[in-house]
Image (cartoon, helix red, strand yellow):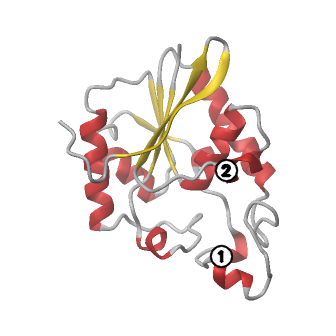
Amino acid sequence: MQELWLVRHGETAWSLSGQHTGRTDIPLTPRGEQQAELLGRRLMKKRFAQVLTSPLRRARETCRLSGHGAEAIPDDDLMEWDYGAYEGRTSADIRKEVPDWSIWSAGPLGGETADEVGVRADRVIARASAAAGDVALYGHGHILRILAARWLGLAATGGRYLGLDTACLCKLGYERETRVIRAWNESYDLLEVP
């Protein structure tokens, strides 16, 4: 049965510092580039019926460096959560103004709600499910977590329980007819991959 392979982009300066990086189009760090190349070693023998990527640079570069750039189709629905006024800020900084703030409960000021991101994730799932085989989705931490939650039939906020590091690979698939997570947050950063 079909699998969706979720690939979070490699490290950026803001992912390293914990800043919310939604629509700011920042590059990978040198380490992030190396992570993407290591992902490519893991994915080099895998053929996909379709490859979709966020149009943001960090996801496109991860896709290219891991060997799927030529076949990738940019998909605006795979862009990261629009963090509005909280773009570029850390959770700790935001909590100085809004105690107990969480992206999952309060959302960002002037940005998208979790449910709005969930609608985008549902559209990605529908497009991917129509492909005649496995699909690779290159994106960002929060959108991919929400996509996985929606795959399982959970509310978008269910993504809060699915931690996802940079340059990690996840697989969504089936157990018989039930949608399941087949693998989650697999890192190849420090592994020697043949």
Q: Is residue 2 above or below residue 26?
A: above
In terms of secondary structure, where does tag 2 sit?
Answer: helix
- Do the numbered discs 1 and 2 sit on residues whose CB atoms are within 8 Å? no
Q: Is residue 57 above or below residue 172?
A: below
2, 52: nearer the viewer: 2
Which residue is at a point 68% across and 67% down the rendered structure image?
83
Quadrant for residue 179, please give it. top right
**Residue to which mark 2 is pinned:** 161
- Tell me, yes or no, if residue 66 can be seen here: no
Residues packed near mark 2 inside 10 Å, few (<14), some (14 to 19) or many (20 plus) = few
In terms of secondary structure, where does tag 1 sit?
Answer: helix
Picture coordinates of residue 43, whole percent (x, y): 31, 34
Q: Quadrant of the C terminus?
A: top left
Estimate the spatial distance between the alpha carbons at disc 1 and disc 2, rounded to whole Å. Answer: 17 Å
Q: Where residue 91 is drawn, which disc sits there?
A: 1
Which residue is at a point 69% across and 53% down the rendered structure image?
160
Q: Is residue 54 left or right of residue 32?
A: right
Mark 1 or 2: in front is 2
